Image (cartoon, grey):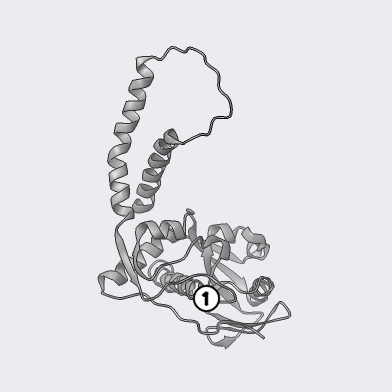
Amino acid sequence: MLRSFSYSLLITCFLLVASCKTNFVPTSSSSQNFSVSDNSLNTDSQLVQMYLPYKNILEKDMNRVISTSEKEMVKKRPESLLTNFLADLLLEEAKIDAETNNSEINPTISYFNYGGIRTFLPKGEITVGKIFELMPFENEMVYLQLTGNQIQEFLNQIAEKGGISIGGVRFIISNEQAKSVQINGVDIKLNEKYWLVTNDYIAEGGDGLTVFTQRLKMIKSGKKIRDIIINHLEQKYKNGKVITAKLDGRVSNE
């Protein structure tokens, strides 16, 4: 996407120049004379001149308010306001994307890896920069078709970890296993096929979820999850909506 490419370019420029300003603590010193050519000075000057316009654009966009939150949202296990909010957002946007671009896909489950959620969302104004802090990775949204048995295996791994960010599913953690699993309000059918939406890192077995590499199908959306979140929040904000979330017992301990 253009926005993702632009952000990546701007951040690359920012980090490149920022690296020139790193502060070091000297532990020893020595002296030696080197000749400095005008060419190297000109190169440095050209780099700064190239960077400055991007720096201004980047700072302006990172400080742009794109949403307002009713309350502070942090991640916790077995469920939390933040994990529920992100999972529900991903599932909602995945359904819209699938309906628009691929009628074969009918996503009923969403999954965010816990470690990929890097910070909280504050109460009040939310900026573009805050979403970059929340999701600093260039992960793509992907769809996986899995059997009910594979979903059960996946949820058992989640139960062992004490819960996670998941949407469209309800289950009880009992002896580190997922019990009484319901998908879209219906008891899981082990021989049924389900579509799960997640990120490409997880789809390739990240966080030890090798069961996802045994999927029946994988379809890439071509969309970055961070861009999806930003666009979702922007649209709600333009419509005057304050974002919120709630605990609903989707994952609970026995």
Which one is in front, 104 or 151?
151
Which one is in front, 27 or 4?
27
Residue 222 visible, this angle: no
Number of residues whose C-alpha sits closer than 10 Å to that of mark 1, classed few (under 14), some (14–19) or many (20 or more): many
Q: Whole-percent x and y of residue 161?
A: 66, 70
Q: Whole-percent x and y of residue 25?
A: 53, 34
Number of numbered discs: 1
Residue 123 higher or lower than 202, as above or below:
below
Q: Whole-percent x and y of residue 211?
A: 67, 65
Task: Say which residue appears at 26% left-offset and 73% top-offset.
Answer: 239
Residue 163 higher or lower than 141, as above or below:
below
Q: Is residue 114 left or right of residue 226?
A: right
Q: Residue furthest right?
A: 175
Which amino acid does the dot numbered 1 rest on?
Answer: Ser
Task: Say which residue appears at 61% left-offset and 71% top-offset.
Answer: 146
Q: Whole-percent x and y of residue 48?
A: 33, 32
Looking at the rendering, which quadrant does residue 96 occupy?
bottom left
Residue 125 higher or lower than 18, as above or below:
below
Looking at the rendering, which quadrant does residue 26 occupy?
top right
Task: Say which residue appears at 42% left-offset and 72% top-offset.
Answer: 72
Which one is in front, 177 or 120?
120
Q: Which residue is mark 1?
A: 80
Which one is in front, 19 or 87?
19
Q: Is residue 174 left or right of residue 1?
A: right
Query: For numbered disc 1, what is the local secondary structure?
Result: loop
